[in-house]
Image (tube, rainbow, N blue to C red):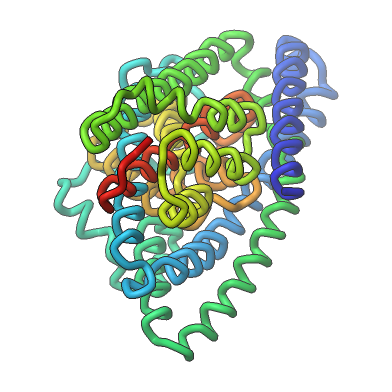
Amino acid sequence: MSMEKKGGSLLWKIGLGFSCGIVFGFAVGPMVPVTPILGNYVMPFLDIVGRIFLTLLRMIIVPLVFTSIVVGAASIGDPKKLGRIGVKTLALYLSTTAAAIVIGLALANLIRPGLGMNIAGATAAPLAGKPLLEVLIDIFPPNPFDSMVRANMLQIIVFALFFGVAATLAGEKGKRIVGAFDSVAETMYSMTFMIMNLAPYGVFALIAMTAARHGPAILAPFIKVIFAVYFGCFLHAVIVYSGMISLYCKRSPIWYFKGIREAMLTAFVTRASAATLPVTIANTRKNLGVSEGVSSFVLPLGATINMDGTALYQGVCAMFVAQAFGIDMPLSAQVGIVVTATLASIGTAGVPGGGLIMLTMVLTSAGLPIEGIGLVAGIDAVLDAARTCINVTGDTAVAAVVAVSEGETLA
């Protein structure tokens, strides 16, 4: 709970840094060419601060993702432990997460929020278009150590998933290495929080540089991003969750949303899936009629690994960054975003600043410049309420479907 509060407070600090950076950049932008102290000292200093922050993000991403997913896969990777309910739950969570990313990418391609920003200075090269079959083959690492050196995130995720499941199947000896990775993962979470405490300053520096160069014209794309994420969350709830309830549970979506409205509102206000969990469980059991056996397994697991709203945000923001830097994203690269973010949802939900870290990973995997983090981190607090609401809503929808598949009768 304390970590949730710290994460929430941090989001608002990042938002404050973003807002101050916008104001500062707009104010000093016209004066930079004619004021030597700004051009020779202040702006170069801000450039250094922004670059150091981005470098620190790059520093933690590989060990953080690898250890987190090894531990996550080990905790849910034993088929005997999972059983029938576990397999159904995991499949539904991954499927709804993938659907959310597809909706986010579709809206970003339609709305094109980053079009016309024309930001220069990208340090990552766009991915060349590849046939879809080759993209799928390339997710399997021939040399996992080389993948780590090159920060090939998709290959790292796949190897970590195999490693975590294999460690579980190895029995007692495997438990030792999982315990060691768990300790490393917890250490990486602490390091992540240390670095994220610097995010308000890094975001201030990055957005101040951008605002100074481009002026007030950069504000319109942010409004488009916010609209795309909120509208995408609405569509995901109406299409995916309503469809699940209608097709599999044979109940009215109005009945469903009425039954979980308290959990949705609590998630929107608190912006914390874990803090909302007691309300989510109560609504799901009392109003939907899901049994204690199903809800006690599906809902806590969902609060940990199910990130539909966050995943949708990743899709929108990845395309926004690509468009802002003038990078064309072929279909194969967008498929890679879907696969990366879906698999990554298993291991990154519990990380403080997880949305920002996950976006860093997605941008790296897609060959996009992580300088784009400075563009979107500041509006994260605005988007977090909608994301968390959809995350929690997805947990309850999956719980209802699993309950019906197990022969239960809903309320």
Relative to 201, 216 lies left or right: left
**Which residue, as the protein is rendered here, is positioned at the far bottom?**
173
- Residue 136 sits in quarter: bottom left
Q: Return the residue nearer the eye: 207 or 125.
A: 207
The reply, left or right, for residue 107 in relation to residue 36 is: left
Q: State how many labels appear.
A: 0
Q: Can residue 206 be seen from the camera position used here?
A: yes
Question: Observer-nearest residue: 328 or 32?
Answer: 328
Which residue is located at x 56 percent, y 61 percent?
64
Residue 46 picture location, percent across and down: 75, 34
Tell me, yes or no, if residue 328 can be seen here.
no
Camera-side residue: 116 or 398?
Answer: 398
Image x and y of residue 141, in percent:
31, 67
Q: Quadrant of residue 215?
A: top right
Q: Residue at x 37, y 53 (%)?
A: 343
Residue 74 location (% of width, % of height): 44, 71
Task: Tell me if residue 393 comes above or below residue 7 in the rendering.
Answer: above
- Residue at 37% x, 15% y is 111
